[in-house]
Amino acid sequence: MRDLDRMDRKILELLQANGRMPMTELAEKVGLSATPCTERVRRLEREGVITGYHARLSPDALDKSMLVFVEIRLAAMSAQAFERVRHEMMFVPEVLECHLVSGEFDYLIKARIGQMSEYRQLLENILLKLPGVAQSRSLVVMEELKETLSLPVAP
Amino acid sequence: MRDLDRMDRKILELLQANGRMPMTELAEKVGLSATPCTERVRRLEREGVITGYHARLSPDALDKSMLVFVEIRLAAMSAQAFERVRHEMMFVPEVLECHLVSGEFDYLIKARIGQMSEYRQLLENILLKLPGVAQSRSLVVMEELKETLSLPVAP
DNA sequence: TCTGAAAGGGTTGATGG
DNA sequence: CCATCAACCCTTTCAGA
């Protein structure tokens, strides 16, 4: 994986902010003609710097306006338990994130649901599918101040 | 904001998975011709169902491979404190998320940094900028099993 | 690695079903 | 609310620097 020069970073910054920007416009903004600009983008995709392009949707419009974090501690961690968690959480669409974390709990899960009445069902979906949940703790988000996947690109 | 029919949902699902899909391909996949398909996309954008398109970048490639969550409790919550948190967190690029949450702490912050040695600097960036932090607790992510903003689109 | 030009394909808007 | 078609723009490829 080669180093990213200033132009690569400008390209990444622009595409991160507008993933559908035409290559001609992108080229103009970074000060290249279309051909080498497109070639750079293809290279960044090939090398895994750009991992995809995604439309961002409004949670409210899709009736998923409630955001909760759930911390989970398992009774016993093992390679099997670990794989089970990965596999199960991958296929619960309401679960947006799942991380193995340090501290008092083992996993931190982020999920979106429509309303409080679906919360019990979510917990069942999570807790019952996982191997031996010893303890859980939930944080309900009362206001979302910032939520992005955009990374700082500066050198 | 009108209701989303089956075709709208199919469009959302496809654009959420591939934000750069050409309108002709999208039209073919949903079973429309290009014109009405494009018009639907424009309407979904106009109505705020689609809020943007973004390239997703690799944290490793940008030297932000470490993920941490920080919980913060303020000494005193007030309208001013609330605005201050929103304003400050908006402009720390390493902070990807910041939510006002229920429970023992007031805020849950998600941030990406390059390595452990930058952690102290991040905490300073966060804690010193916020008004009267009474307590904080950090979770270090040891493995990321899932991380997405993609929402379930099913009716 | 870049520019520039040409060919192919996607997008857009008018028209009509 | 949809399909068709033509004009325009974008993308892609290739020759040349």
Image (tube, coloured by chain):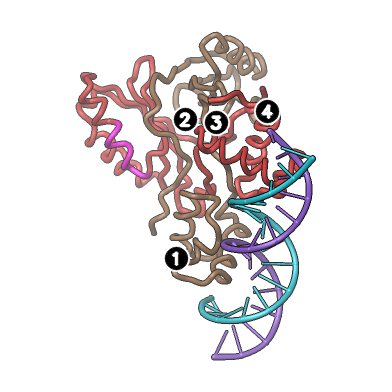
Chain colours: A brown, B red, C cyan, D purple
Q: Position of residue A7 (x, y in %)?
A: 45, 66
Type of the residue with mark 4: Phe
Type of the residue with mark 3: Glu
In-image side of B152 versus B66 (left or right): right
Nearest to N terminus: mark 1 or mark 4: 1
Is B92 part of what is drawn in magenta?
yes
For mark 4, what is the residue? A91
Badges 2 and 4: C-beta atoms under 8 Å apart? no
Cα distance in 3D space between marks 3 and 1: 34 Å
Nearest to N terminus: mark 4 or mark 3: 4
For mark 3, what is the residue? A97
Q: Nearer the viewer, residue B107 or B104?
A: B107
The image quadrant of residue A155 is bottom left
In-image side of B87 versus B115 (left or right): left
Q: Give the range drawn in magenta.
A: B86-93
Asked whether residue A43 appears in the rendered view, the answer is no
For mark 2, what is the residue? A102
- Residue A30 is marked as 1
